[in-house]
Image (cartoon, helix red, strand yellow):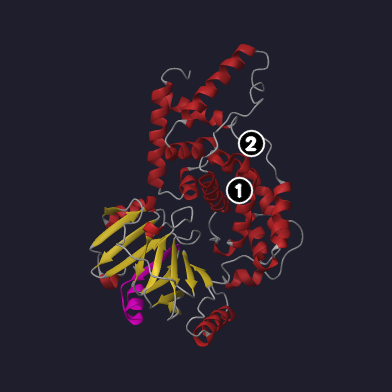
Amino acid sequence: MGSHDDLEAALRELGEHVGPSAPPTDGVARAVRARLEAEPAAGAPAGRWWRPRGRWIAAVVAALLAVLLGFTPQGQAAVERVLRFAGIELHIGDPGPLPSGVPRALPGEKRVTLAEAREAVPFEFLVPAALGDPADVRVADGGRVVSMFWPGIRLDAYAGVLDVLWRKDVGAPFPEEVTVGTSHGWWVRAPHGLTYLSRDGIGSKDLARVAGPTLVWQRDQAGYRLEGLPELARAREIAMSLR
Amino acid sequence: METTFCRAHTPREGAPTDDDEAITRSLAGDLAAYEALVARYSAIAHRTAALLGAAEEAEDVVQEAFVKAFRHLSKFRRDAAFKPWLLRIVANETHTATRARGRRAELALRAGAEPERLPDDPEGVAIATDRRTRLLGLVRALPEREREAVVCRYFLQLSEAETAEILGWPLGSVKSRTFRGLARLREEVGDGLA
């Protein structure tokens, strides 16, 4: 339709006259460099830490957990460590009181079919063959999360490479670093507080609930959290059956 | 991953020639290489922040986004394009900044942007300016998501796929929100555009 094309052309033309005209270039580059140099500890690209490229990293993590496990008597758990991994912020230490109240749906949660879910989310996710087709599938928060349900089991898949979507507050027994096939993951055995963080990173009290044992891992571009299996072996078996 | 890491230990001399090399060198801690990458994308980053509503905070938003991008660089998928990945961080930072402020900045026509096209035709300039002002007013009045789609697709001239990545929407949402936004604008504009 002619007027349609005219409108698109008019919008493109309008775009040339909106927004900043003289873009800063070198100034920004220098400022960014200065900031990175000023914080040398955090200067190296993050993510290296939590995506082990070498054994030393696993060793450091293991040592950290050993410290937490071995030398942290009750009451000293106030030493909090924060691990960021596969879209999850794991706060390890004093978990505080577990959230109470009824679990609420995630923002904008809708019941869909598996095929609709694949259309609705901007990342690819897999389904564990060991469980068969989910009994219920939901997409929430504008396609940020897809949740699959089987009796007593919940699997959330989300684009967890860049964003942090969940906060877990975990006390003893502390999370255990595990492998899921070739990926690296965490097994959180203890009941813990789980808060969904909305897109701007703010988690409201309404979105906090108690979570049961959970396995967290990443595969390709999706992060996964599998909740409801009391035994790591079975959780891992299911996690490794993603197809 | 391992090969990338090894390669990163033997940085080449001089300015990086492409994004991939700049990223490899940045991952090895070469800040000059990252500075080159920042210089290459700061204009589009700044424009994205401003048009998505960051106003006078755009500069802070852009700096913060580049610092974050550096820290998350190892999570960047190397077979993907750097620009949409970066702009996604810019868009997230913009949302955070505008939400903290409670309201987003209005899109505004650039002062003094008018005369370049029809220097000998003051009447024509006035009409063009008036038309732009009116169309911009209509874009401003669009529902937020439709406005973001229109801003990305037409003002920033990004592809549907890039828009989807930057705003974190499924491709289908980009298509439908752009379509709805255009339909709404067309209805309002009527015949007044020609």
Residue A10 position, x and y percent, is 51, 26
The single residue placed furthest to the front in the displayed view is A75
Residue B85 position, x and y percent, is 54, 53
Front-lying residue, A226 or B15: A226
Q: Residue at x 38, y 70 (%)?
A: A98
- Callout 2: 10 Å neighbours few (<14), some, many (20+)? many
Residue under label 2, please give it. A20
Q: Residue at x 26, y 55 (%)?
A: A113
Q: Amino acid at mark 2?
A: Pro
Residue under label 1, please give it. B61
Quadrant where the N terminus of chain A lies? top left
- Callout 1: 10 Å neighbours few (<14), some, many (20+)? many
Query: Which mark, residue A71?
Result: none
Above or below — where is A21 with respect to A162?
above
Task: Say which of marks 1 and 2 sits in front.
Answer: 1
Front-lying residue, B171 or B151: B151
Q: Numbered disc 1: what chain?
A: B
The quadrant holding residue A210 is bottom left
Say if residue B90 shows up in the picture. Answer: yes
Residue A227 magenta-highlighted: yes
SS class, disc 2:
loop
Residue A183 magenta-highlighted: no
Q: Amino acid at mark 1?
A: Val
Distance from Cα at disc 1 to Cα at disc 2:
14 Å
SS class, disc 1:
helix
Q: Which residues are magenta?
A: A221-239
